[in-house]
Amino acid sequence: MIDRLEAPPVGPAVSVRFPTVLRDTLHPGFELWTIPRPGVPVAAAMLVLDRGSSADPAARPGLAGLASDLLDEGAGARDALELADAFARLGCELEVEVGADVTTLGVTTLTRHLPAAISLIGDVVMRPRLEQADFNRVRELRTARLRQLSRSPGAAADRVFLEAVYGAHPYGHGTLGTIAALDGCQLDEAREFWAAQLASAGAALIVAGAVSHDDVRAAVDPAFTGWRGSGPLGQHDVGVPDAPAVGRVLLVDRPGAAQSELRVGHQGPPRRTPAYHALVAMNAVLGGQFTSRLNRTLREDRGVTYGVRTAFEFRRSAGSFACETSVATEATADSAAEVRREFASLRDPGQLGDDELARAKSSLTRGYARHFETAVQLARAAAHLVTHQLDVRTYDEFVPRIDAATAADVARAARAVLRPDASTIVVVGDAEQCRAPLERLGWPVVMKTPAF
């Protein structure tokens, strides 16, 4: 008889074997990766350009995002509507994403339509129109989005935290930029940025699914003839930012707010850190899953939040580590202090039991294979390898290396990375109620107004 009040036993971990990747250099600064996966006649194509928002000029945060947003507004002989219709006739749409380090363009379509889809992507990046009317409309839409976000406590907290962690470094702003920067931007700046940065960057086209490498290459060669990229992808280096050496509290006033939006964290390592697997295991224990320590403490024991999470954002040169939650206003200072205490506790190997670590590792490894089920997932996984210049065996090694992590490994990584006494606490809430309790934490409280 099955006892449904007890969790079923956890089975053994199964390692993932990432499919074979076939690689070619087609043009200087342009690589082709194919991941043949016979079966469902679907293919995903993703073009990775070696520039992201960190390439924005200091006076124009958001320029990479604005220039990239113009790409589907017309290319070659097609205007915006004709281009959208051309993709739709292939059963797909173009997705453009701008991150800190790279910009990606992707489509998913039936394999028989892949050559036509690649040709359209080639048009978009080789012959974008970048016209004034489209520029005006896209800039207005992005400005409206910023005005909308300025009313969101979560967006305000994220903005203040990002700037606090990275300062004036190129990582210190988001992809939308600011209203002031957008208002001052002209079409010529977007065109020049596209030509000098994105269109001249190293690039990799990744195609995964029911494809053959030779067929993909035959479609790619004519679509990207004349590519102007210089150097291999991964060459763009923005350097390591200075990290704040002391703890501080940054308070954004939202009079009358019943809850406080809370961020606690600091700068973190890049993706290529040797401690990656120990840090991922540590995060799962701390706040990376629903049964993690912080969620049990703040949600279940204290009842001051609906949920809390911690996460690393790994970037190429330096990342960040943060706890994110919203808590009842009267619990703001105590919750921030509890987060710091939990940060500190994991630095001591005696504070992490084998059973707790085993559960955290199981949550990471037992479902790991689901990240590689579809052509889109495979293409995204390969794009991550390209972005951070990781070995193709990275995913094969994940399960065994997580399983091998010990409490001592986790504590060692936590001591190297977690900085509870030099964290930044960001609070977006009612300053009249929050400020005095926050000051009693012993750190200076600075009032902030985020720039949108």
Image: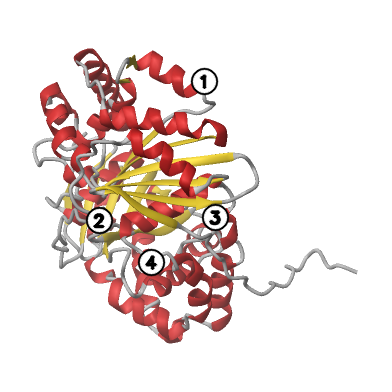
Residue pictured at 14% horizontal, 30% vertical: 181
Mark 3 crowdedness (10 Å alpha carbons): few <14, some 14-19, many ≥20: few
Which residue is identified by label 2? 234
Q: Which circle's residue, 2 or 3, is located before the other in the chain? A: 2
Which residue is identified by label 4? 391
Marks 3 and 1, how far apart at CA: 29 Å
Q: Horizontally, is 58 left or right of 282 in the view?
A: left
Residue 450 visible at all = no
Q: Which of 440 and 35 is in front in this view?
A: 35
Q: Which circle's residue, 2 or 4, is located before the other in the chain? A: 2
Residue 122 visible at all = yes
Q: Nearer the viewer, residue 135 or 82?
A: 82
Which residue is identified by label 3? 371
Residue 198 location (% of width, % of height): 21, 39
Marks 2 and 3, how far apart at CA: 24 Å
**Considering the image in quadrants, where does the C terminus appear?**
top left
* Disc 1 and disc 2 in contact, CB within 8 angstroms: no
Marks 4 and 3, how far apart at CA: 18 Å
Residue 253 location (% of width, % of height): 25, 41
Marks 1 and 2, how far apart at CA: 34 Å
Q: What amino acid type is highlighted by mark number 2?
A: Gly
Quarter of the image for residue 240 reads bottom left
Mark 4 crowdedness (10 Å alpha carbons): few <14, some 14-19, many ≥20: few
Q: Which circle's residue, 4 or 3, is located before the other in the chain? A: 3
User: Which mark lies nearer to you, 2 or 3?
Assistant: 2
Q: Which circle's residue, 3 or 1, is located before the other in the chain? A: 1
Q: Horizontally, is 220 left or right of 5 in the view?
A: left
Q: Which circle's residue, 1 or 2, is located before the other in the chain? A: 1
